[in-house]
Image (spheres, grey):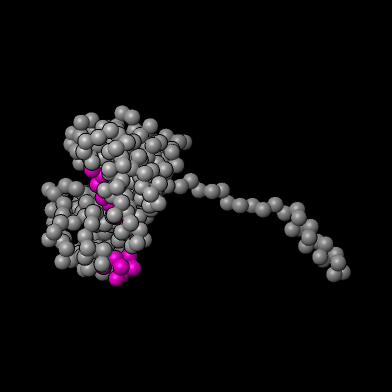
Amino acid sequence: MKRSVWGMAIAIIVFVPAVLPAAEPVDVLRKDNLVAWCIVPFDATQRGPVERAKMLKELGLTRCAYDWRADHVPTFEQEIKAYQKQGIEFFAFWSVHDEAFRLFEQYDLHPQIWQTLRDPGEGSQPEKVEKAAQGLLPLAKRTAELHCKLGLYNHGGWGGKPENLVAVCQRLHELEQDHVGIVYNFHHGHEQINDWKSSFEVLQPWLLCLNLNGMNPGADPKILGIGKGQHEFEMIRVVVEAGYDGPIGILDHRSELDARESLQENLEGLEQVRTKLAASND
C-alpha cells in the first residue's frame, strides 16, 4: 500500500507540468520608478523641507533628486529627516558640498551624485577626454568612498554630447572608477532629437537616470510638460522599446510655477504617453 502511494506521488511529480506565470514586461514609466527633479530652488511656492516631503508623498512620488542653492545649505539635515519621515528616498544630490557629504555618512545615505561634464578646453578629442577624466578623478574617488554612484550630467556644449559623456565614462572605468555613469536630460538634449535612436543606443549601457521633458525643435520652449511637445512621445518610445529599466526623472525647473503643478502636469502627461504606447502595441 505504501509503495503504491509513493508511486502515485512520483507520478504526480513527474507528469504534472510546472505552470509558471508569464513574465510581466517592465513598465519603466510606472510611478514608483519616478524621481522628482529640480523642485527645490525652482519651486515658486518656495516650500521648506517638511512641506516638500509632504507634497511628494501626496503626489505618490517616493524618490527625489535634490537640487539646491547656497541658502538651502542650513536645511540639508532637515531635508533628510523630512524625507525619512515621509518615506521618500534621497535618490540623488546635485554637485558637491562638504556638509551634505558629511550628512550622508552620518545618516548612512548613498545617493547618486550628479555632476555636469564640462568642456575641458583646448586639445584633440583624446586629449580632451583624458583631461576631463583626470579632472573628475578626485570626485570619482570621493564618491566611491561614500558608496555613491557618480553621474555625469549633460548640460549642453562638448560635455552634453552623448559620445563625449560615454568616452569620459569609459576612461574613468579604465581608471578603476566603475561606479561612474551618465544622467541624461531631455531638456538639455534638444540637439539629439533627430538622431535620438542612435544617441540612446550609445547612452543606454551607462545610464543611471533619464530625465524627461516635453520636446519641441529649437528648445522652444526649453522646459515643457511631458505630452505637450512634438517629439517626446517618439523619444520615449525608443527608450521603452530598447528595454531601458532604470530610473526616470520628471522635473519642475520652472520658477514661475508651483512645483506641485509642474510635477502633476508631468505625471498626467506621462500617463497619457503610457496609454498611447499600450494602444500602439495592441
Pinpoint residue 27: horizontal percent, then vertical percent: 42, 47
Say if residue 5 shows up in the picture. Answer: yes
| Point 28% across, 50% down: residue | 136
Magenta stretch: residue 111 in it?
yes
Residue 87 visible? The answer is no
Residue at the image position 43 percent from the left and 38 percent from the top: 241
Question: Which residues fall within the magenta stretch?
Answer: 103-118
The picture places residue 52, in percent across and down from the top left corner, at 21, 61
Please state if 67 lies on the left or on the right of 145 as rendered: left
Asked whether 36 or 158 is in front, the reply is 158
Residue 214, percent from left and from top: 25, 39
Q: Quadrant of residue 198?
A: top left
Q: Residue at x 26, y 32 (%)?
A: 191
Q: In the depicted view, which residue is nearer to us: 44 or 93?
A: 93
Q: Quadrant of the N terminus?
A: bottom right
Q: Tell whether 108 sits left or right of 123.
A: right
Quick check: is 128 in the magenta stretch?
A: no
